[in-house]
């Protein structure tokens, strides 16, 4: 199981469908209590600028947040944009891992899919970057 | 002459709103938010930047409602923002973590990692593309698929190992810092001030100046930045050390589970500029020495001109020149906010019947007095 930071990065960045599927499995087997139904709000973005290495606020980003409880463990689902379903799924998956539910031990197939998608995504981005990468030596020939 | 408070016009106002809606529907077409985001991305970016709220969906909605008027759209988004609770502050976002899609330097030809042009209109002729008149959805899809196929083809030809990079590149400025050409700043963790939570007083804090500039009106920031370069203080113009467009990952922390943990929440597109400025520095022996200073710009979205102008103004206010209006923070900061500027100018359309009558009365009194003395 990945740490929370890495888990959420993969699910939000590349595993939306898998997160929804994982949550569906958990909801079929356990009582999921709402602590906070999906709500929209803001997160203020704190940035370190590079000229003097000070901090400032860049602005706010729209987020959707959900909190659920499964077998006494609280899960948080939070992501940018208006995505109530995905926010709920993230909260359920978070709670499932925190509660140590046995289903989470069988999700390697999902993680393999997600990692594969991330790999392809990076390849595509790299190929796009290389297409517009300037080769000055060629220009001088 | 006495003044009487009046009311009225409610029916006319209702009809005015209906007429505006009717005129917007005259052609019998409507544009979807997806179409706005796809076809007017730069405008969506500007609206997000000036409203200080990152949400392409809400910015597209605001633009649709405002019939494409960016001022009105920004006003709508700022108003909507005020109805939403602020639930989190992100952890400190380090721009070195940016997933870069475009990076150029006007200072050095060869930069570590190379220059990447990305998607930019800079290299296109400014000629109207008549093909767009009859462009269809099928044309768009065909081009997209053709380009994507070329990328997939390029992918297959590249060695697997080279794909491990995440689009992160070393900063150009770091090479100058390593050579002591630019001083290495001391890391400052002082909590930033927030212009949305406190009134602006002078002299202002650096964090407030940067926040006001990044949410400033693109045109105003650009015009004042241009004024600075053109002749109010600079002997020579700044040089772009590095301009980047890319995506910043955002994280928040939560202690829900009993321990403080970081959650990734997504990424936002930004433009970052580090501009080199010639500076006179006073050394310990009180001799003046020529050095290089850094101006900094960072904005939501692909917003290059504004980010460059921000870097110029930020540096100008940080290193003020007497008599230079663009280094007068009161002059700059009080006039670049879109909602404040457009709101004030727009209020001139509101009824001023009483105050104007009062002015007329004063003029008449003076004229009567003059005639009496004559």
Image (cartoon, rainbow, N blue to C red):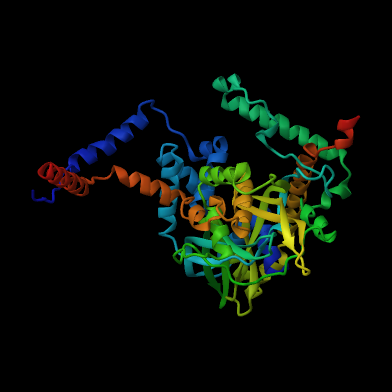
Residue shown at 66%/74% (left/top)? A100
Q: Residue furthest left?
A: B1
Q: Could you say where residue A69 lies in the image, as x and y percent from the top left? A: 54, 73
Q: Is residue A97 above or below residue B314?
A: below
Residue A80 visible, this angle: yes
Residue shown at 66%/60% (left/top)? A49
Q: Could you say where residue B352 lies in the image, as x and y percent from the top left? A: 23, 46
**Quadrant position of residue A139:** top right
Q: Could you say where residue B261 lies in the image, as x and y percent from the top left? A: 65, 73
Along the line of sight, which residue is nearer the eye, B161 or B58?
B58
Q: Could you say where residue B156 lies in the image, as x and y percent from the top left? A: 84, 39
Q: Is residue B272 above or below residue A78?
A: above
Residue A82 visible, this angle: no
Quadrant of the image containing the C terminus of chain A: top right
Quadrant of the image containing the N terminus of chain A: bottom right
**Quadrant position of residue A47:** bottom right
Residue shown at 57%/75% (left/top)? B256
Q: Residue furthest right?
A: A141
Along the line of sight, which residue is nearer the eye, B241 or B235?
B235
Residue shown at 53%/56% (left/top)? B328
Along the line of sight, which residue is nearer the eye, B2 or B115?
B2
């Amino acid at each position: 199981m990945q740490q929370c930071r890495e888990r959420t990065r993969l699910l939000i960045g590349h595993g939306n469908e898998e997160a929804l599927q994982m949550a569906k499995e958990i909801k079929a087997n356990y009582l999921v209590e709402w602590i906070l139904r999906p709500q929209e709000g803001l997160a203020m973005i704190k940035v370190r600028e590079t000229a003097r290495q000070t901090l400032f606020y860049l602005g706010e980003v729209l987020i959707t947040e959900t909190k659920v409880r499964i077998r006494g463990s609280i899960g948080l689902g939070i992501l940018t944009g208006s995505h109530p379903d995905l926010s709920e799924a993230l909260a359920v998956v978070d709670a499932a891992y925190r509660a140590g539910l046995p289903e989470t031990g069988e999700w390697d197939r999902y993680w393999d899919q997600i990692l594969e998608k991330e790999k392809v995504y990076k390849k595509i981005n790299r190929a796009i970057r290389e297409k517009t990468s300037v080769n000055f030596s060629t220009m001088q020939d | 002459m006495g003044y009487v408070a009046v009311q009225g016009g409610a029916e006319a106002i209702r009809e005015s709103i209906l007429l505006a809606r009717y005129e917007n529907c005259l052609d019998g077409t409507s544009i979807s938010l997806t179409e706005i985001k796809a076809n007017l991305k730069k405008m969506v970016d500007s609206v997000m930047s000036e409203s200080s709220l990152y949400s392409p969906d809400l910015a597209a909605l605001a633009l649709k409602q405002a019939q494409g008027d960016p001022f009105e759209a920004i006003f709508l988004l700022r108003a909507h923002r005020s109805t939403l609770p602020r639930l989190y502050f992100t952890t400190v976002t380090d721009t070195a973590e940016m997933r870069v899609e475009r990076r150029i330097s006007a200072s050095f030809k060869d930069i570590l990692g190379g220059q990447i042009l990305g998607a930019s209109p800079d290299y296109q002729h400014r000629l109207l593309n008549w093909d767009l008149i009859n462009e269809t959805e099928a044309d768009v899809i065909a081009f997209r698929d053709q380009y994507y196929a070329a990328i997939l083809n390029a992918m297959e030809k590249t060695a697997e190992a080279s794909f491990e990079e995440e689009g992160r590149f070393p900063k150009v400025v770091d090479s100058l810092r390593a050579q002591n050409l630019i001083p290495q700043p001391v890391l400052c963790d002082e909590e930033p001030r927030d212009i949305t939570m406190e009134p602006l007083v002078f002299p202002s804090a650096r964090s407030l100046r940067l926040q006001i500039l990044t949410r400033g009106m693109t045109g105003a920031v650009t015009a004042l930045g241009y004024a600075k370069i053109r002749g109010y203080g600079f002997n020579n113009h700044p040089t772009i050390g590095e301009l980047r467009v890319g995506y910043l990952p955002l994280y928040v922390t939560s202690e829900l589970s009993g321990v403080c943990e970081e959650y990734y929440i997504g990424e936002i597109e930004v433009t970052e500029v580090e501009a080199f400025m010639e500076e006179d520095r006073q050394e310990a022996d009180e001799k003046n020495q020529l050095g290089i200073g850094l101006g900094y710009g960072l904005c939501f979205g692909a917003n290059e001109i504004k980010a460059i102008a921000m870097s110029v103004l930020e540096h100008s206010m940080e290193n003020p020149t007497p008599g230079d209006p663009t280094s007068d923070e009161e002059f700059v900061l009080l006039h670049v906010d879109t909602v404040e500027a457009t709101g004030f100018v727009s209020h001139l359309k509101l009824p001023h019947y009483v105050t104007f009558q009062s002015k007329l009365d004063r003029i008449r009194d003076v004229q009567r007095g003059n005639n009496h003395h004559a």
